[in-house]
Image: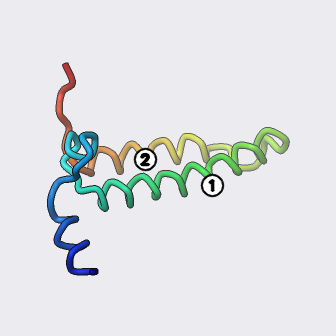
Amino acid sequence: MADIISNYSAHFSYFTHPNHVCMSYITHAKLSLTFCYKFLGASAKAFIHAFFPNLYITSTTDVVDEIDSILKKSGCRTKKS
């Protein structure tokens, strides 16, 4: 079963969105879950920062920059019409 999944993940996905960004379903899922993890951490830090402004001063900017960097390095970019 693992061979079937790994062989399938090397190909493009049945879904259109992963195909538009040149990713397999599995690669796209891993990337999306990575963002989920990063956004959860950033959300907690932003909540704390709201009440204690001297804590996590640049955390929101840092996570935005990190995600932007990850997005630029992943998949491909196609122009949408």
Q: Which mark is residue 51?
A: none
Q: Which residue is mark 2?
A: 67
Q: Which type of secondary structure does the marked residue at label 1 adopt? A: helix
Q: Quadrant of the C terminus?
A: top left
Q: Residues within 10 Å of mark 1 (few under 14, many from 20)?
A: some
**Quadrant housing residue 10:** bottom left
Give the CA separation, mark 1 to mark 2: 13 Å
Question: Residue reaching furthest front?
Answer: 1
Q: Amino acid at mark 1?
A: Gly
Q: Quadrant of the N terminus?
A: bottom left
**Quadrant housing residue 76:** top left
In the picture, measured across the screen, residue 45 lies left or right of residue 77, that is right
**Mark 1 vs 2: CB contact within 8 A:** no
Q: Which residue is mark 1?
A: 41
Q: Residues within 10 Å of mark 2 (few under 14, many from 20)?
A: some
At 79% across and 38% down in the image, what residue appears? Answer: 50
Residue 13, image x, y percentages? 22, 52
Visual colour scheme: rainbow
**Quadrant housing residue 61:** top right
Question: Residue reaching furthest top?
Answer: 81
